[in-house]
Amino acid sequence: MANVVMLLGKTGTGKTTSIRTLNPEETIIINVLGKKLPFKGSNSLYNAEKKNLFRIEDYQQMINLLQACDKQPHVKNIILDDCIYIMRKEYFKRAKESGYGKYTELAQHFQQIISTCEQMREDINVFMILHSEDVQSDKVIVGYKVSTIGQLIDNQYNPMEVVPMVLYSAIKFDEKGKPTYGFYTHATMEGMIQIPAKTPNEMFDEDFIPNDLGAVVKAMNEYYG
């Protein structure tokens, strides 16, 4: 069973930038939106010629590519960047369909992607990069959740519940306003807001670590032996 990790957070908080410390010879990026990678030298490190950067827009295509990567022994890390947009794109393709059944199918298709990841080799790490949105109570932010396509999906399916690790990306500022980009590793409270992070017991000592996927992979390898 592969290590499946969700990287959840607001846009601009360093989720995709954290890829920069991974070895591109061992890493495949599946880029749903086709955005430029936000770190120096990314075009030469990840591209179609090197066969480590792919643009996928359909859930079945993603499943097929994941299964193909599983057969390539050099692949150790797989990034599913902006992967919730697989669900969003299918939703817009089926916008004219009436009834609620399509929402169940959208959730099922996304879960099939997660299940495919889980069934891959145990020496593969899959990082699913997702955007978060606010959870509010009486118009006050009390937490964060995965941004899907609305309440009809949210009432049926919470992707965070079906994976063992969730890292929540955020920016902290010091007294001089200097930013530090990082990941929360454990559920914690920041003021009145609950941070939806979770990792196996004692994998990380710190509640907030640098946004460095190379270090995350090292920690997972050491933890699982």
Image (tube, grey):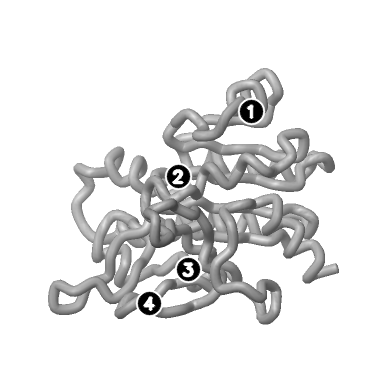
In this rendering, would 108 be left or right of 139?
A: right
- Picture quarter with the N terminus: bottom right
Disc 2 designates what residue? 82
Mark with earlier residue (4, 3): 3
Q: Which residue is mark 1?
A: 46
Q: Taking the image as drawn, is residue 106 in sight?
A: no
The amino acid sitting under disc 3 is Met
Of badges 2 and 4, the one in the foreground is 4
Residue 82 shows in this picture: yes
Instruction: Give the position of the C terminus as an image quadrant.
Output: bottom right
Which labelled disc corresponds to residue 194? Answer: 4
Q: Residue under circle 3?
A: 160
Sequence order check, earlier mark of 2 and 3: 2
Distance (Cα) linking label 4 and label 3:
14 Å
As displayed, is residue 17 above or below residue 151?
A: above
**Badge 4 or badge 1: first in the primary sequence:** 1
Local crowd size for mark 3, using a 10 Å CA cut-off: few (<14), some (14–19), many (≥20): some
Q: Amino acid at mark 4?
A: Gln
- Position of 73 relative to 196 (above/below): above
